[in-house]
Amino acid sequence: MAKLPILVAPDPRLAKKSAPVLAVDDGIRQLMDDMLETMYAAPGIGLAAPQVGELKRVIVLDIAPEGEAPAPLRMANPEIVWVSDDDAEYNEGCLSVPEHYADVVRPASCVVKYLDENNQQREITAEGLLATCVQHEIDHLDGVLFIDHLTSLKRNIILRKLLKAKKTGAGGVPA
Ligand code: GNR
Ligand code: NI
């Protein structure tokens, strides 16, 4: 396992559409495990491959509360095949948008079809935090960040602060 560096916005790689995985093989399984290690270390509850510079449709999640048994989910080519009519608002953050949080409205529940770590097709119904998180991660695969759901005014304020932090080297690991 290896902990990977996480890209911080603005970065052109975070705005790109990621490519489908042909099959979940040893290379993709290794990527999933490295992403989980990176996510737990951050710490975070989800991570998408483009956040570690791999433009592949792979995400990992674990919404188990701290102190409870880990419950990692590994997904390739996740696809939302149903969303509820009712919405939920959640105060979202993102490891690629460090130290910024904002309320985002998304469908409250969804059904996601994906390939698991054994290349088996699966489907889950997600509600609550898992529904929010899996939609946030699938957005990353399409080059969309949670700040893209905000008004351009709010988004630009955050992007300018992130750019300034990058230029002064504040808050992060030296490049
Ligand atoms: O760790 C994370 N927490 C979080 C909180 C609310 C909504 C979404 C998330 S995902 C985020 C990790 C991350 O950036 N995943 O892409
Ligand atoms: Ni994110």
Image (cartoon, rainbow, N blue to C red):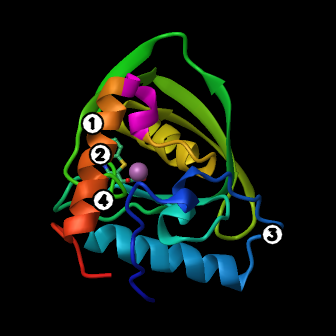
Query: Can you tell which of label 4 and label 1 is closer to the viewer?
Result: 1
Mark 1 and ligand 2: say if the CB distance to the nearest ligand atom is below 8 Å: no
Neighbours of disc 2 within 10 Å: few (<14), some (14-19), many (20+): few
Contact check, label 4 and label 1, Cβ < 8 Å: no
Residue 87 place in picture, x, y as percent: 43, 15
Mark 4 and ligand 1: say if the CB distance to the nearest ligand atom is below 8 Å: yes
Q: Of 147 and 115, which appears nearest the observer?
A: 147
Residue 138 place in picture, x, y as percent: 57, 45
Residue found at the very far top of the displayed protein: 85
> Could you tell which of marks 3 and 4 lies nearer the N-terminus?
3
**How far is disc 4 from disc 2 in space, using C-alphas?**
24 Å
Residue 74 appearing in the image: no
Contact check, label 4 and label 2, Cβ < 8 Å: no
Label 4 sits on residue = 44
Disc 4 marks which amino acid?
A: Gly
**How far is disc 3 from disc 4 in space, using C-alphas?**
26 Å
Q: Give the range drawn in magenta.
A: 146-152
Quadrant for residue 158, please give it: top left
Q: Is residue 89 left or right of residue 145?
A: left
Disc 3 marks which amino acid?
A: Ala
Please give the name of the residue rendered at 61% of the width and 51% of the height, measured from the top-left corner. 141
Query: Can you tell which of label 1 and label 3 is closer to the viewer?
Result: 1
Disc number at residue 23? 3
**How far is disc 1 from disc 2 in space, using C-alphas?**
5 Å
Q: In this view, does 104 lie to the left or right of 108?
A: left
Contact check, label 1 and label 2, Cβ < 8 Å: yes
Disc 1 marks which amino acid?
A: Ile
Label 2 sits on residue = 160
Query: Where's the N terminus, which quadrant?
Result: bottom left
Contact check, label 3 and label 4, Cβ < 8 Å: no
Neighbours of disc 4 within 10 Å: few (<14), some (14-19), many (20+): some
